[in-house]
Amino acid sequence: MRVTVTGLGVALFVCAFGCGDDSGGGAASTTGEASTSEPTSSSTSAGVSTEPAPTTSTTTPASSSGLLDESSDDDGGLGEGAMCDLYTQDCQEGFKCSPSLNPVGDPSGTCVAVQGTAAPGDPCTHDGVTAGTDSCDARGLCFGELSFVDGWEGTCRAFCTGSQDAATCENPDEQCAGGLFPNCLPRCDPRLQDCEGPSEGCYFRGAVDSFVCLTSMNAAAAGEPCETGTSCNPGTQCREAAVVAGCSGGSCCTEYCDTEEAGACAGAVGGDTCIAIGAFEPEFQTVGVCGIPQ
């Protein structure tokens, strides 16, 4: 069962799969999210900052379900259930730091047993956010359509290295998504939609994170209402209603375009003007969406 998430703590957890950095109408959902309005210079997640420092305490253990066990006297030792740092991956050998939920629903890193051998880039399965375990090896996490009940299928993505303020990826063709799920996601071009993972699309995560491959919900075509970035079909972006012609919701999907291409939005559903979205990277500075100038 796929669910729409409610509650601030759980919403933060869900958005960490890739929410954008803007407040333009996007709401938390069950998959990785992308920007829904014009970017700012600081990456956020579905209108909330992706800057909260990851928990690094090694003194509060958790149960094998991934939930904190406040009754235990064990100091954790960064073994199973211990709270950990998602960037430094400081769990003991045989475990990895995986995003999970604590008893009040707040996201955190918890040491879980490494149960798989799938390498970054390989297909994978995840056992759900409560368990926190998946079929990826110690180097990564299974990215896919998030479910709180059934788990999900996806692609193993490598953990970012470094720290929250200076995160890096070993693969130069990947971008650290940051936030509560600091994993390296493939860079992509929204005009080409060149992502290779199953059910993935190229989505805008904000001016800093730019365009990365995220699992698409394929729920809305151009001109249709959307709740989140990845609820739009690949090749479109979720934008506030004022920008999209004929939008009947709070926000709607509209087509990507190139501001230097003559007639780029001729016949487009969202509008006939290509509006730059403000990506920082030089190769993407002409990327825009078809819409109504504001």
Image: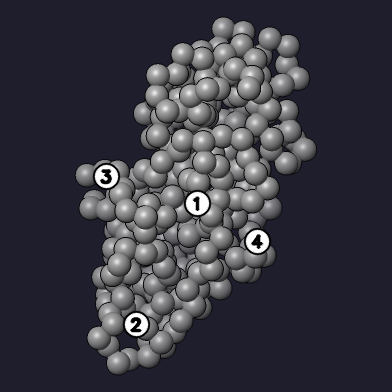
**Residue position for label 3:** 3
- In percent of width and height, residue 83 lies at 41, 77
Q: Marks 2 and 1: which is nearer the front?
A: 1
**Residue position for label 4:** 168
N-term-proximal mark, 3 vs 2: 3
Q: Marks 4 and 3: which is nearer the front?
A: 3
**Coloring basis for residues:** one colour
Q: Nearer the viewer, residue 103 or 170?
A: 103
Query: Is 142 rendered above or below residue 252?
Result: below
Q: Is residue 267 visible?
A: yes
Q: Is residue 119 visible?
A: no
The CA distance from mark 4 to mark 3 is 32 Å
SS at mark 2?
A: loop
- In percent of width and height, residue 36 lies at 52, 35
**Residue position for label 1:** 48
Q: Marks 2 and 4: which is nearer the front?
A: 2
**Residue position for label 2:** 61
SS at mark 4?
A: strand
* Contact between labelled residues 4 and 2, with CB atoms less than 8 Å apart: no
- In percent of width and height, residue 58 lies at 44, 84
N-term-proximal mark, 2 vs 1: 1
N-term-proximal mark, 1 vs 4: 1
SS at mark 1?
A: strand
Q: Nearer the viewer, residue 60 or 126?
A: 60
SS at mark 3?
A: loop
The CA distance from mark 2 to mark 1 is 28 Å
- In percent of width and height, residue 15 lies at 43, 50
